Image (spheres, coloured by chain):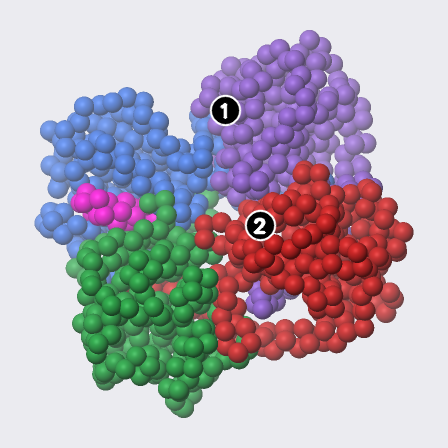
Chain colours: A blue, B green, C purple, D red
């Protein structure tokens, strides 16, 4: 694997599909929202993306199985719309890898004749708030008009948007595929089902999709527990690794 | 986008053009000077440069629009001179990327038959001074003679010049395109309109251009405010990111 | 050397060979186990792997000879089984390099018609324990059944497996070569002959190989002493290097 | 410049030449020794090496001229021997770049029919000593016999040799060009003319060259002063840079 590859498992018939993307990031907002959507509308997986720019790790699955880190593409027809959903368990470890992966996703989306793209994520405030999380929208002017009529506020200034969520819209613009980022306000340090619900609600409304948001909180709780468990294992492991690495750097004979 | 690309928007007729470059760096001296020049002489954009070696971020523009980080090329005819102006909002994140980007700029400049190059930047002293900022010149001997007669002092010894400003002149020399770096003395930590004015004044004089420097201070103030605002947002965001990254490094399943 | 290369020294006749791999890592469990196996069954070296993704160092061998860091492949026929053994003194320094090296190993294994793969390593607990070290197995479901009947416990959940040991099984799965990781419980900071013995015992039993484990402890002690000696030399050297590097970063003229 | 290039300035007639290499590193032992040799035997430059893997900097030369960081090749005929001398002001910033550069040097050396290679460097002890600096030799067994009869002690064990000095001998071995590293004992933090003299003396004796070592101490003193001066400039500059970089990482719009 010299470069990012997409393995196509089946070729669904899609009509002017909309791409919705969410990957691990701030508050797991994007990934959580998109995973909920996949489960609720029973979207079917039809492609997998592998990349040498992902971390050099194997992922342990249920039952002791091992696989590479990957991204996945699901499709569904829901309320008259064709949807392509992009999620996964990793982002690139280098800037150049980010560009390569997002370009491959855009090649794939073009082949599927994707007409619009919504990427979901979080923006961190570092504060806990009981108020309804704000959703900020950034991207294509026409799509911005759409989402702003469903409660997303258009951000008129500000810093960069880091990672695939912003790159997809930025690189998509060069190919004239309109896209918009929807970023939910979040503390940043916890899996945030309220921010995920807020961004997902905007997408559902703008696309006219009927999807229950009921189980989202339960899903977030499970994710949080899984992360906490893995984290405990990893912290001690990483301490070991760090010390080991220093030694290994010289132990080569 | 596997490598740096220049998208040409129009093909101006230029006669023995001079390239003037300034990118973000020490005290924003180069970028500020060049942006002022573009505005004052109403230079027109005719090309954009994109690169996978820029940070993997999208840039938020006025009105909530998103775009990739990029470099831009402007052209103008001013006081009988053809000018090509290179600026942008990013430099490469890797050494190899710096070489690739600067080579692409030189390919482009050769195609435009650029005859001379002036790159503008700052050199940091870490001190505030009320004196007129010194301008140091480095590069092609003949161009050095020119700029030294307008107040730039030729630096006869010293350390390396880091980044595109020096690489353009260094790589240009291998192609026999003479160039000179003009570096204005600056504290380094603040947007420095006085250093920008000092380096720009030298370029204007050596090329015989009549351009007002009046609004430069106002422009610097606006840039400073914009940076401060973004910085406040970013600092808290980065704290979140750092903690998140540690966790994300293991959360891949 | 633009990319990883495997230099084949001889072409052994192998019949449905099993690949067993162990490289430097946690507690040197994998490397120690595999080196013991090579010595005990008098496996013969038949290929060497070199890579520009290994550390940019030369390795000093007995007698003052110098060579590049490398991986090695040995073969043997033992108790009716054809074995290919992969070990070495380095892993890649970049994630992309890890992918490249493991793909080359898989190309090579496919050419040899390898039917199964066992990779050996350690998982660090940071604790010393007098109990028999646990062996955790992860990977192909059928191979998992095999190893679990010889005392390896199948890990049903958990974090990522970092490095070549997991990547080989993960990338091998995409090529339909079944593989399993056997990870021995270890403190992580010391060369651990007990964990190496535990993982090796599982492999020997599942493959029906008769190999003495008697000298493993002695081998571990020698490795530990060698590492300690080199470490003493290196620590003072590294302190020097760090200071030097800071200076060298500017001394380029 | 996508990859390392060697620009050949002239084609000297060489008969079974010996390559002697020394680059910036521990105590500047290698670079200082080789630069002294070049000056004393009036070796002539005949090639330059440029690489995108060098630091992304321009080097300021005497008189305010600018050039890229580079390596240089000199040749001479001295006491009946053809010599090729490799030195320069930079090493690669990445491991992969080190491999690429050294392979280009070996391609070049093969084209020149180089028969033997001596690389000079230092090994740091972190201690000052008044004793004659020890010279350690590592590499090809036959060349080791040669240098050991002139006072170099063959190191029979030890850690890795980092950088081009070891890689040239390691990669050269794969091409069957015999080489040896001569490493002079040095404190590591100061330009060390005594270690440079010690390693150079061995090379001169083994090759039967008559070269005065008288001016080496004076040359070392000048290098030290130059480094100190540049260092003072750089330290304050680097402090600025570090703070700036943090800010620039977000200032991209």
Reply above or below: D66 against C168: below
Residue A170 among those drawn in magenta: yes
Residue C172 tag number = 1
Q: Is residue A245 left or right of residue C223?
A: left
Q: Quadrant of the C terminus of chain A?
A: top right
State the residue in front, C142 or D45.
D45
In the image, the segment drawn in magenta is A159-180
Mark in the foreground, 2 or 1: 2
* C-alpha separation, residue under disc 2 versus residue under disc 1: 33 Å
x and y percentages locating residue B226 in the rendered image:
27, 70
Residue that extends furthest to the bottom in the rendered view of this protein: B131
Is residue A155 toward the left or the right of residue B234 in the image?
A: left
Labels 2 and 1 positioned on one and the same chain? no
Q: In which quarter of the image is residue A48?
A: top left
Q: Residue at x 77, y 60 (%)?
A: D78
The residue tagged with tag 1: helix, strand or loop? helix
The quadrant in which the N terminus of chain A is found is: top left
The residue indicated by pointer 2 is D101
Measuring from the top left, give residue C249's x and y in whole percent: 57, 64
């Amino acid at each position: 694997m010299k470069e990012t590859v997409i393995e196509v498992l089946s070729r669904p018939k899609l009509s002017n599909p909309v791409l919705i993307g969410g990957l691990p990031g701030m508050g797991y907002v994007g990934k959580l929202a998109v995973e909920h959507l996949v489960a609720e509308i029973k979207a079917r997986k039809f492609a997998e993306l592998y990349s040498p720019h992902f971390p050099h790790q194997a992922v342990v699955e249920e039952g002791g199985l091992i696989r590479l880190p990957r991204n996945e593409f699901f499709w569904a027809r829901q309320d008259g719309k064709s949807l392509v959903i992009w999620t996964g368990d990793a982002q690139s470890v280098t800037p150049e890898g980010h560009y390569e992966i997002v370009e491959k996703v855009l090649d794939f989306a073009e082949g599927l004749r994707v007409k619009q793209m919504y990427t979901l994520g979080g923006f961190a405030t570092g504060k806990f708030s009981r108020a309804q999380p704000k959703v900020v929208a950034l991207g294509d002017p026409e799509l911005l008009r759409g989402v702003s009529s469903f409660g997303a506020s258009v951000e008129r200034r500000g810093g960069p948007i880091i990672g695939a969520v912003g790159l997809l819209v930025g690189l998509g613009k060069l190919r004239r595929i309109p896209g918009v980022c929807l970023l939910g306000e979040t503390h940043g340090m916890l899996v945030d089902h309220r921010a995920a619900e807020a961004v997902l609600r905007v997408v559902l409304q703008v696309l006219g999709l009927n999807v229950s948001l009921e189980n989202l909180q339960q899903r977030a709780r499970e994710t949080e527990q899984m992360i906490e468990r893995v984290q405990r294992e990893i912290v001690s492991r990483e301490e070991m690794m760090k010390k080991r690495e220093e030694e290994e750097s010289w132990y080569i004979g």
